[in-house]
Amino acid sequence: MATQRMLLPGSERAPRADARPAGVPNLTDIIDVTVVLRRRTPLDLSQQDTPIARDAFAARYGAAPDDVQRIEAFAQAFDLTVVSVDQGRRTIVLAGTIAAMNEAFGTTLQLYHGVHGQYRGRSGPLYPPADVAEVIVGVFGLDNRPQAQVRCRRHRCIVGAAQASDTSYTPPQVATFYQFPTTVTGAGQTVAIIELGGGYKTADLRAYFGALGIKAPSVTAVSVDGGKNAPEGDPNSADGEVLLDIEVVGAIASGARIAVYFAPNTDQGFLDAISTAIHDAVRKPSVVSISWGGPESSWTPQALTTYDQAFQDAAALGVTVCCASGDSGSSDGVTDGHAHVDFPASSPHVLACGGTRVESSAGALTAEVVWNGGLNGGATGGGVSDVFGLPDYQASAKVPVSANPTHAKGRGVPDVAGDADPATGYQVRVDGHDVVYGGTSAVAPLWAALIAMINQARGGPLGYLNPTLYGAAAHACRDITSGTNGAYRAGAGWDPCTGLGSPNGAALLKAIGKPSTASTKRPSNKTPLHH
């Protein structure tokens, strides 16, 4: 009797535009996939006003045992092996031959060759058996194309014409500009950093923090899906991203522990790193910093949905997620002539971090505008989501309609901003070299460090910060009113270039107050506009 199959909604995949067919993979090769299951009980953040413990979350909102058993029976029927089950993350990892995976999920994997090398991919939707399709939210790992790009830019004098105000700063100098609290260090907090390549050397960290006169922070490398701390030895590689992230957090929130989750640069690796960090019951991060991303149009609908659900998990667990909003202006690097926002920054459940250019005198800010270095110098990402609806917390933010012909009303990106122009960038040490980096990649760890410090000061996690930030704490941001990122222009109040603005750390701490006095009631979850 033939297996009855059902189209898995949102699983449609197309080859990369730059890819060409390169044959058929070896059908006996063993691969693994991450299957994400539905929640046992729907998660409604509007009914929650305090963080949930991780074990309680798993029991209440994790995968149902019956659904797990269905997938285990499915695996047995198609000669797949159950590698691991994580109830809280709602993930089951299955391993098997490519031939078995093709049969199990109703697809045909191919090899493709593109500008980033060869990858294993597929086209069209997945068609698993009907009795398991209804419990599956997404399947990741069949396709292993590179999914995300770093959101950092190294400063080079050859980029554009130098301005008299071009300079660079140490992270503590930037923290001073933004009046970060001075009586806390992030002690007792763990900041998780997601990395999809590259690595760090302890010798670089010792030298960097020693030169700043700061005790080197505790940094732990965590392997996800076989990813490793693997420095390439080139400051222009992904090492630049890794060291920028660690050194910005460590130089500002010097008392916080840092856990770096290394995973392969695939939609499976990226998702598994994020969900592993959020649900890590050993290190218990209170903040996650993500400086990798890609335009919304480069993701499958199932990825957009599943990642956003992971960020909803973070909100429920009291974990703040900071995401870089992109470094290629309102196009996000897409050459179709339309405006695009970066994901995961466009998820309504993360703090999207845009970029500015700063000027200073005598240790104080004197001017701050939208970061836009022109065609080769980069510009802050920002705009209006084509996927996610306008969240409740942005209802009064006067988010404009999309600049695209659809004029869609959607989630506005970014939420906040900070120094990102490489020409006014951050002094870091990478692979034995002292270099200057900028990009919104620097702004995500900047805000993550601030949040770790505030968490320590208030004795509890900020968690899902956005509703509070757009409400009682809106005045704690420095409004940026000058500049453009292409299709959008800065102005008074929230705008699609710098959001609410750059931080005033002391004002933010004062506005938020202690956990016992802060209102943390959440708006209801928003779902994608369309797929």
Image (cartoon, grey):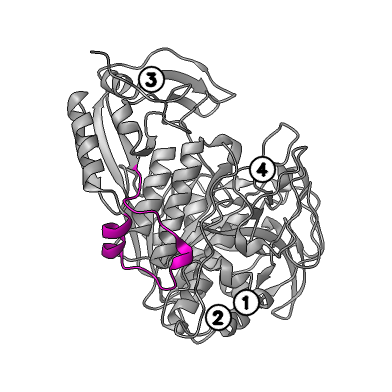
Q: Is residue 412 magenta?
A: no
What span is in magenta? 37-61
Type of the residue with mark 4: Asp
**Are the residues at dot 4 and dot 1 in contact (C-beta closer than 8 Å)?**
no
Q: Nearer the viewer, mark 4 or mark 1?
A: 1
Q: Nearer the viewer, residue 312 or 372?
A: 312
Cα distance between the residues tagged 4 and 3: 31 Å
Percent position (x, y) of residue 41? 34, 54
Q: Quadrant of residue 135?
A: top left
* Residue drawn at point x = 54 percent, y = 21 percent: 19
Percent position (x, y) of residue 481? 80, 65
Query: Mark 1 or mark 4, which is nearer the start of the sequence?
Result: 4
Disc number at residue 473? 1
Type of the residue with mark 2: Ile
Cα distance between the residues tagged 1 and 3: 49 Å
* SS state under label 2: helix
* SS state under label 4: loop
